[in-house]
Image: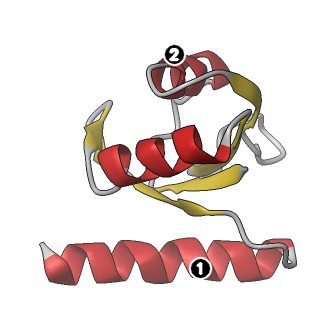
């Protein structure tokens, strides 16, 4: 299962996310999109090997502080990159309102 991780800092690495998500099970892949200057865009995708472990990670890590940022963790949705950015933005807004 692929997870969408939002509200990440601009110093995040694939290794940071691999270490965090390995606590819940094997990580198959991590993608941290970057801009033209190789700066992370503030979101990432983590592919977990097992759906049950992915759900456990999602429940445990959503709205948790990681490297100074309260991250959002949700199941990735197959859509265009623009839609995914909007989804991350709205998830962040909802998280801030919910406190």
In front: 7, or 24?
A: 24
Query: What's the distance in space between the residues labelled 2 and 1, CA to CA?
Result: 25 Å
Residue 70 visible here: no
- Residue 65 at what x, y percent from top left? 24, 41
17 or 26: nearer the eye? 26
Q: Which mark is residue 19?
A: 2
Q: Residues within 10 Å of mark 2 (few under 14, many from 20)?
A: few
Whole-percent x, y for residue 46 in the image: 68, 40
Q: Is residue 10 visible?
A: yes
Q: Position of residue 13 (x, y in %)?
A: 61, 24
Q: Secondary structure at mark 1?
A: helix
Q: Nearer the viewer, mark 2 or mark 1?
A: 2
Q: Nearer the viewer, residue 84 or 19?
A: 19
Number of residue marks = 2
The percent position of residue 34, horizontal first and vertical second, equals 76, 43
Residue 87 marker? 1
Up-down: is 26 above or below 96? above
């Amino acid at each position: 299962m692929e997870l969408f991780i939002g509200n990440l800092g601009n110093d995040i690495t694939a290794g940071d996310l691999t270490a965090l998500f390995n606590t819940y099970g094997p990580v198959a892949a991590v993608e941290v999109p970057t801009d033209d200057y190789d700066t992370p865009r503030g979101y990432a995708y983590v592919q977990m090997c097992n759906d049950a472990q992915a759900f456990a990670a999602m429940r445990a890590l959503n709205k948790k502080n990681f490297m100074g940022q309260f991250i959002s963790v949700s199941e990735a949705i197959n859509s265009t990159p623009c839609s995914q950015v909007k989804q991350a933005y709205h998830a962040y807004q909802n998280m801030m309102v919910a406190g």
